[in-house]
Amino acid sequence: MADRIMVSFAGPGSGVGELTWGQQHIWGAMQALGETMNMVAVQELAPGATIGEFAEMLRYYTSRFQAMRTLLRFAADGRPLQVVVDSGEVPLEIHDDVDVPGLVARQEAAAFDYEREFPIRMLLVRREGVLTHLVMVLSHFATDAAGGFAMYADFAGRSTAPVGMQPLELAGHQRSPAGRRQSNTALAYWAGLLDRVPARQFRDPVPVDGPRYWQLEIESPAMFLAIQTIAARLSVDARTVLLGVYAVATARITEVNPVVAQLLVSNRFRPGLSAIVSNISQTGLFVADLAGITIDEAIARTRRASVNAYKHAYFDVVEWKALLAAKGVELGSYYNDRPSPMPQSTVTAAPPLDVLRAALPQTSAPRWTDLPYFNERLMVTIDDAPGAVALLVLADTHYVPRPQMAALANEMEEVAVAAAVDPQTPTKID
């Protein structure tokens, strides 16, 4: 059993409104996956930490940020509405002599009661009367990681400046004539691009023995070096190069061109949204024809295609789903470049072939993990690792068998190394 202290809060702004487009997006993903998607952070506490200071932290977060004092209400048709309250109480829990990793695992899996529980949990761990750890849990429905960092930055400076855009206000703007124009423009772009999507992107499903959903993970120093080299040569950022390499490798392995993928886009680049505490990411549609050109030109094309995807990833999700249904298109491929900072290249010339080839044996052995569920056909996720590109390939093996998953990871590495050595390397795509 844990001790529980109720922390009161009061803040400006309250009311009932539609979900923002970003909230629509993340709520749909949570429902499709059947996952909490909770974000959990752990902090080891310095000696002398007190319960009172964390009660004040919790009060600050819930008073200042509407997202932290939002509940859901479900209409008769199941449609969720956001309900922002201006005052209330939220619990601060103190757990004695518990295993911290176990507590974290339980909190990752414990769904919020969205109609009755505010989307923030703060738990303190105490050993022999001394506070040792803080476990902070945020519902992914309430905010994304960038919003969580914005909250912490405000608290660290004890900011009392106006917060700026809050989710309820944003939902109202999105329903305004200007918001409707934005959504209509984005969906018109999608409608036109969907007509270019190949009718078949994956093979017909073939059942396999054993687990159906798998994740493959590798770390590649050679890919990291190659990507940095190409980025320096083309004067573009490394993540642009990574997207181009992914697109070329995918077209080669699947033998489908143009390449089609959904991109996860953070809309924080839009005016007034950089520091919003909410979930602001949506899906962008990426389509690129890479036949008969060099990899350098493929990178330039994918850059243009990605800019258009980012520009048009801000729309009413309910209407977007209706558009997909009307077009009869099922988009099953996802590319997710997690927004962590990859250092800018300091390489000014391509290293010799033997240097890049020498890095290839340093690629980690593949690590396979079977997944309980996966709601796409294929997803490639890019993470950072020290001196390497961390590459995760997730797939429904009824559509993308494990050998093809491994081939895609290997092909990305090979494409990057070849293009780093020779700017005239062709895509080898018909």
Image: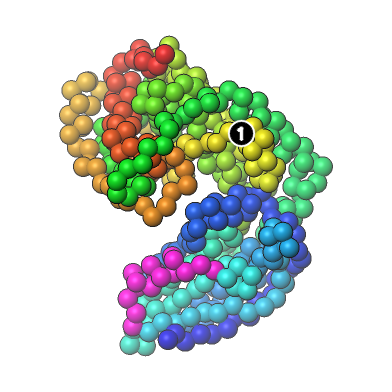
- Nearer the observer, 43 or 416: 416
- In magenta, the rendered stretch is 97-112
User: Can residue 103 be spotted in the picture?
Assistant: yes
- Nearer the observer, 345 or 175: 175
Which secondary structure class fits the magenta region best?
Answer: helix
Which residue is at 45% across, 82% downward? Answer: 94
Q: Is residue 198 left or right of 73 when viewed as pictured? A: left
| Amino acid type, callout 1 | Gly
Label 1 element class: loop
Residue labelled with disc 1: 328
- Nearer the observer, 120 or 12: 120
What percent of the width, then of the height, locates residue 108? 43, 65
User: Can residue 231 be spotted in the picture?
Assistant: no
Which residue is at 52% across, 79% downward? Answer: 92
Q: Is residue 176 left or right of 188 when viewed as pictured? A: right
Which residue is at 28% across, 26% downward? Answer: 414
Residue 236, compared with residue 164, is above or below; it is above
What percent of the width, then of the height, locates residue 309? 58, 32
Residue 55, compared with residue 32, is above or below; it is below
Residue 45, compared with residue 391, is above or below; it is below
What percent of the width, then of the height, locates residue 230? 37, 24
Q: The C terminus appears in which quarter of the rendering? A: top left
Q: How dense is the environment of label 1, judged by Cα within 10 Å: few (below 14), some, or many (20 and up)? A: few
Q: The N terminus appears in which quarter of the rendering? A: bottom left
Q: Is residue 218 left or right of 241 when viewed as pictured? A: left
What percent of the width, then of the height, locates residue 245? 39, 27
- Return the residue found at the far right: 177
